[in-house]
Amino acid sequence: MSKDDKKSHALKLADGAGPCLRSAVDYIEGRNSAPAPQAHDKCDLGRWYYETAPGETEHASHSRFPELGVVHMAFHLACDEAVRCKDAGDLEAARAALQRAADLSRQIRNALAAVLGTDA
């Protein structure tokens, strides 16, 4: 895979966090109904991480590959926590969980860029 292809692939996978985070934000802000929880291994990045990447030795053996999995799972948990907090009537905690999810999204992008050898 060329460097440009890697960058494109990384951006596509990293941007997959956007819909999950936007759905949670829209719900917390009252613009949509509650999003269904999305399992961390069922989104585009999760499927790549658990199904494809282990067979791609150059990626799976990268020192930041385990970090990517941990941060990615934490991202999904933070989005789910935001929804649970809103459902419990705690908007302050919901917004704090959304901020954590946004921070984790940036960490996902950085770890993925490192794993794929690009500056995404």
Image (spheres, rainbow, N blue to C red):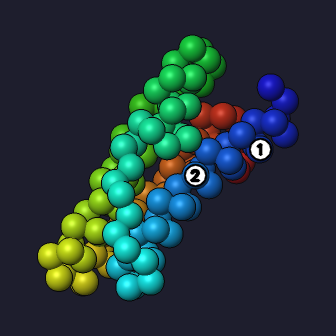
Q: Residue furthest left?
A: 88
Q: Amino acid at mark 1?
A: Ser
**What residue did someone put label 2 on?**
16
Secondary structure under tag 1 reads helix
Q: Is residue 1 above or below residue 87?
A: above
Q: Is residue 93 above or below residue 109?
A: below
Q: Quadrant of the N terminus?
A: top right
Q: Residue at x 56, y 24 (%)?
A: 53
Q: Residue at x 24, y 77 (%)?
A: 86
Residue 60 in view here: no
Q: Which mark is residue 26?
A: none
Q: Position of residue 70 (x, y in %)?
A: 36, 40
Residue that mark 1 sits on: 8
Q: Give the camera-side residue of 22 and 3.
A: 22
x%, y% of residue 94? 27, 75
- Left/right of residue 30 with respect to residue 6 in the rendered view: left
Q: Nearer the viewer, residue 82 or 42?
A: 42
Residue situated in front as seen by the camera: 110 or 86 = 86
